[in-house]
Amino acid sequence: MGTDTRNIPLSFSYNERLTFRIAPVNKKIMSADADWLLDEEMCMTPEVGISMLLPFIEPYMKHEFKFDEEINTMAFSSVKALIRDLTQTCDILEKQFNNPALTQFKDQLPLAVIAGDAAASIATSAGKAERNKLLKENLPVILRFYDDVIDQLKHYLKDFREDGFRHIAITTP
């Protein structure tokens, strides 16, 4: 991969500007008998969370995903499957960028966030081929984002199970 140092906005502790949030939760937190683990929250903009993660999250939700700061929970067993799906998609993206199975996934990626507003504006007016070219040029930025998300989810599974954590909570405006 290249040496691009740009990043998709992602924080691993509470950030009031980044309002799509994921955090490990246990029964005490869910019943409001304990505070949220703000230092463990994974935060991103709603645009990033909705376009880059929600399509992977929704299949594992027992109910329709709720917005407006409602709490959505996902069992750790589903988080394992989510990690698997994210990893497989990244592998295909890296090794077979033009695979037709990725078309819908690539179409929903937020180009302005990934490549910058100016580049996205040019690509949008030029069409799908230019958009794909820009996504491919920014593949290290995309893969770095997903690698960071996967690492944080693995951290939740590994380091919180012993303390009675069995779910992650996902909230968004």
Image (cartoon, rainbow, N blue to C red):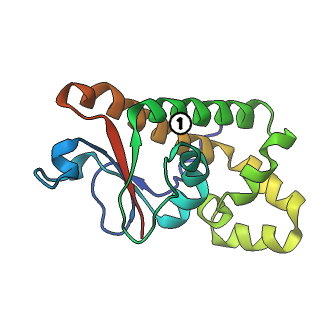
In the rendered image, the quadrant that contains the C terminus is bottom left
The residue sitting at the front extreme is 63
Q: Residue 64, image x and y in percent?
A: 52, 58
Dot 1 corresponds to which residue?
82
Amino acid identity at mark 1 = Leu
Residue closest to the eye, 106 or 65: 65
Q: Is residue 65 above or below residue 78?
A: below
Q: Is residue 169 above or below residue 128?
A: above
- Give the SS element for disc 1: helix
Q: Residue 68, image x and y in percent?
A: 41, 72
Residue 123 in sight from this viewpoint? yes
Residue pictured at 68% horizontal, 62% vertical: 111
Q: Is residue 82 above or below residue 20?
A: above
Residue 37 in sight from this viewpoint? no
Residue closest to the eye, 67 or 89: 67
Q: Is residue 128 left or right of residue 40?
A: right
